[in-house]
Amino acid sequence: MGKIITVTPAQTLLEALRACGADPASSCEEGVCGSCETAEIEGTPDHRGSVLSAAEHAGETP
Ligand code: FES
């Protein structure tokens, strides 16, 4: 069974995952490289990076 992790407005997804003991893949930490890309299950993410297109942010298949 997976964990439910809440990402506060003051946190990045990586910060929230690390606070829960996870060790997610990452590199640039700035939303540029895409190494931390992951799928959301619920909620409306605030995409701050530049890796995904507007269509991908909207959940559309590129
Ligand atoms: S570590 Fe997330 S985009 Fe680079």
Image (cartoon, grey):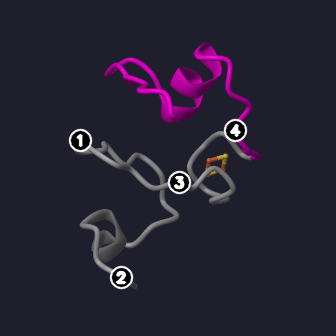
18 vs 16, left or right, is: right
Identify the residue shown where x is 31% and y is 42%: 46
Q: Main secondary structure of the magenta part?
A: loop
Which residue lies under the disc numbered 1? 43
- For mark 2, give the secondary structure: loop
Mark 2 to mark 3 CA distance (whole Å): 14 Å
Marked residue nearer the N-terminal end (4 or 3): 4
Q: Give the percent coordinates (x, y) of residue 57.
A: 32, 63
Q: Does the segment drawn in magenta span residue 38?
A: no
Mark 4 to mark 3 CA distance (whole Å): 10 Å
Counting the numbered discs, the total is 4
Mark 3 to mark 1 CA distance (whole Å): 14 Å
The region drawn magenta spans: 1-27
- State whether residue 59 is above or below residue 36: below
Which residue lies under the disc numbered 2? 61
In front here: 28 or 38?
Answer: 38
In front here: 28 or 35?
Answer: 35
53 vs 37, left or right, is: left
Q: Does the segment drawn in magenta span residue 9?
A: yes
Identify the residue shown where x is 38% and y is 17%: 10
**Numbered badge on residue 38:** 3
Amino acid type, mark 2: Thr
In front here: 20 or 29?
Answer: 20
Question: Could you classify mark 4 by the number of other residues whose Cα lies within 10 Å: few (under 14), some (14-19), or many (20 or more)?
Answer: some
Amino acid type, mark 3: Thr
Amino acid type, mark 4: Pro
Amino acid type, mark 1: Gly
Marked residue nearer the N-terminal end (3 or 1): 3
Identify the residue shown where x is 74% and y is 31%: 23
